[in-house]
Each structure stands twice: as structure tokens, then as C-alpha cells.
Image: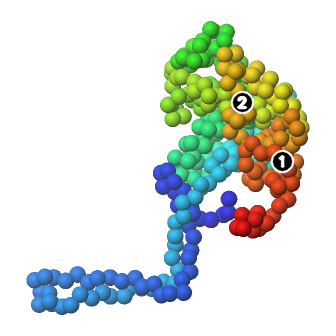
């Protein structure tokens, strides 16, 4: 995103641009006339009080809220090495990065409150001990599978309302922060607007698509594509058994490609392919390669 000044309302971000004009723009003022004075019959007139050859315009923009949030928060991972802190997790952030609270994170990125809250919910972000964390795909998938496993053990029907407190009672020793569990359940719940709910209902189709996207982002070797059969099997294993008949590649909301026949890969991990230049569900070939320059694509589109 270019480094432009922005103006944020409660729900929208506007890019501020200075526009030069070859015409003169005059700022005028109409004098106040006392109708009881002797000048009440004076013809209407205005006074020029200033001029300008440039103006500022506001352009509605759609900032990459999720990307900006990711750049401003600490990543939360399940422990994968011996560098664990007391909560049993491995957190990471860029060198020189100061950990921030949720409110500090909002203040540090140029988006509106509404866009921030939406990105916070969509990413499963949470705050723990005054620090804002953004879970990795692996952490989100692990949290969901812990919720699913606990629900199955308790005999909970995920097609109906679930009791969050009852689930948490059997999950509190699993190493997942309560705030993360709440964030995942809120992310998948019906009509909660991202807010925790003591007895939410899981949106089945949204959950199926979301879990599939997480599975796609968590292969053993991220630079290697999944076989489609292996990916679908892993996807099924991450869902309640009654839901598995619903899975389809068409449900995936994350950008993906087929680098070769019978294989699938998350685009961010595809060597030589720029994520921002792609559309979901495309087969990678020369016509979609990022080696094509933007002006070539523009020229083709204009024909």
C-alpha cells in the first residue's frame, strides 16, 4: 500500500491526495447585511478572501487490513522448539519490534476502527497479558482441532449451540490461551459480530471453508505442494465426520493454484508467484505468471 496520508472515519479509510489546478480557485465570503440598516437595498455581492491552486481530495480506499494487522502484531505459535515461554508457546516478531497491546496496535496502523475490528476477528487475533497476538495458520488449526476433539469427547453436537464454558473446562490444560479459544469460536460463530458468546452456534459452511484454508497453509514443507487427495484427506480429518461430505475445492476462500496436475498449493508459498497478482482457483501457467509486467497486462486489457 502506497504511503499516502489517510483520513479515517469510524468505518472507512480515505486516502488524501493533493490535486493541482491550472484554474484559479477563489474562496469567497458573502457579507452579512442588516435588513434594518440603510444598506439593506444594496445589490448582493461577495468578497474574495483567498485563493488556491491546489485542493485536497478524499478517495475511498480498501486498505489491506489483514496484512497491516499482521505487520503490527506478534505472531503466536504452538511450541515447536525448546524456546518456550511460561505459557508454553513460541511467539515471534521482527527484530526491534516492540510488543503492543490491542489498543496500541490499532493506533499504529492507518485503518478505521471498523476495518480494524473486522480484520481482528477474521485473523483470530487476541490479547493476552496486554500483548496483541496474531495466531499462525498452524496455531489456529491446532486450536480448532482441540475444540473439535473436546466437543467429540463431551458428545457435543456442533450443529447446535455449544457451551463455551463447558468446552473450556476440559481444554484449560491443553496450552491454548482462553482468549485464543474464544477468538476461534467467535470467528466461526453465527451472528456474533466477532464477539464472544457463551452459547454460540457454529456456521458450518463458513467453518468448513475456513478449516480448508488453514490446512492448505500448513503443509509439512511449505514450499512443496499438496497432492489434492492428501489435502482433501487432511481437510476431512479436521472436521466433524458428518460435515466431510460437504468439502469441495470451490469452497476455499484463500488464494490457491495448481502448479501441476493433481496438486494444489497456497499461492503465498508458490515460488515465483506474487500473491497480489493472482486470483483464487487458477491453474498456474505462463499467462498468470508474475513475470508479466503490469503495463503488459494493462495493454492487453485495453484491447
Work out whether mark 2 precedes mark 1 in sequence or the reverse, and give the earlier one.
2
Closer-to-camera residue (184/61)? 61
| Location of residue 299 (image quadrant) | bottom right
Which disc, if any, is residue 297? none
| Looking at the image, residue 270 lies above or below residue 288 | above
SS state under label 2: loop
Horizontally, is 229 left or right of 164 in the view? right
Q: Is residue 298 visible in this depiction of the protein?
A: no
Identified at 70% across, 21% down, the residue is 245
Which disc, if any, is residue 284? 1
Disc 2 residue crowd, few under 14, some 14–19, many 20+, Cα 10 Å? few
| Location of residue 6 (image quadrant) | bottom right
Estimate the x, y position of residue 252 in percent, counting from the top left.
70, 36
| Looking at the image, residue 264 lies above or below residue 17 | above
Q: Is residue 168 visible in this depiction of the protein?
A: yes
- Identify the image quadrant of the C terminus: bottom right
Identified at 50% across, 87% down, the residue is 23
Disc 1 residue crowd, few under 14, some 14–19, many 20+, Cα 10 Å? some
SS state under label 1: loop
Whether residues under marks 2 and 1 lie with C-beta atoms below 8 angstroms apart, the answer is no
Q: Which residue is mark 2?
A: 248
Estimate the x, y position of residue 170 in percent, counting from the top left.
64, 13
Estimate the x, y position of residue 133 in percent, counting from the top left.
67, 38
How is colour applied across the structure in the image? rainbow
- Identify the image quadrant of the N terminus: bottom right
| Location of residue 174 (image quadrant) | top right
Horizontally, is 173 left or right of 220 in the view? left
Amino acid at each position: 500500500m502506497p504511503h499516502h496520508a489517510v483520513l479515517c472515519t469510524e468505518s472507512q479509510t480515505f486516502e488524501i491526495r493533493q490535486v493541482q489546478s491550472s484554474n484559479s480557485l477563489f474562496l469567497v465570503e458573502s457579507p452579512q447585511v442588516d435588513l434594518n440598516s440603510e444598506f439593506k437595498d444594496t445589490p448582493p455581492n461577495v468578497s474574495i478572501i483567498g485563493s488556491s491552486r491546489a485542493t485536497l481530495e478524499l478517495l475511498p480506499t480498501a486498505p489491506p487490513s489483514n496484512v497491516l494487522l499482521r505487520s503490527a502484531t506478534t505472531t503466536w505459535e504452538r511450541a515447536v522448539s525448546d524456546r518456550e515461554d511460561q505459557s508454553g508457546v513460541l511467539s515471534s516478531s521482527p527484530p526491534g519490534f516492540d510488543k503492543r497491546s490491542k489498543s496500541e496496535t490499532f493506533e499504529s496502523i492507518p485503518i478505521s476502527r471498523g476495518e480494524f475490528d473486522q480484520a481482528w476477528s477474521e485473523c483470530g487475533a487476541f490479547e493476552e497479558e496486554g500483548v496483541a497476538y496474531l495466531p499462525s495458520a498452524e496455531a489456529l488449526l491446532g486450536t480448532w482441532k482441540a475444540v473439535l476433539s473436546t466437543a467429540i469427547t463431551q458428545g457435543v453436537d456442533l450443529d447446535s449451540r455449544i457451551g463455551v464454558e463447558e468446552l473450556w473446562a476440559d481444554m484449560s490444560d491443553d496450552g491454548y490461551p482462553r482468549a485464543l479459544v474464544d477468538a476461534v469460536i467467535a470467528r466461526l460463530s453465527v451472528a456474533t459480530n466477532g464477539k464472544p458468546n457463551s452459547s454460540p452456534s457454529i456456521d458450518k459452511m463458513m467453518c468448513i471453508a475456513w478449516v480448508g484454508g488453514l490446512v492448505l497453509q500448513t503443509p509439512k514443507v511449505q514450499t512443496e505442494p499438496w497432492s489434492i487427495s492428501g489435502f482433501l484427506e487432511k481437510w476431512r480429518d479436521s472436521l466433524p465426520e458428518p460435515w466431510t461430505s460437504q468439502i469441495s475445492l470451490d469452497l476455499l476462500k484463500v488464494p490457491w493454484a495448481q502448479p501441476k496436475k493433481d496438486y494444489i498449493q497456497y499461492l503465498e508459498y508458490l515460488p515465483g508467484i506474487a500473491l497480489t497478482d493472482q486470483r483464487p482457483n487458477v491453474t498456474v501457467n505462463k499467462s498468470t505468471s508474475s513475470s508479466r509486467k503490469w503495463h503488459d497486462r494493462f495493454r492487453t486489457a485495453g484491447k
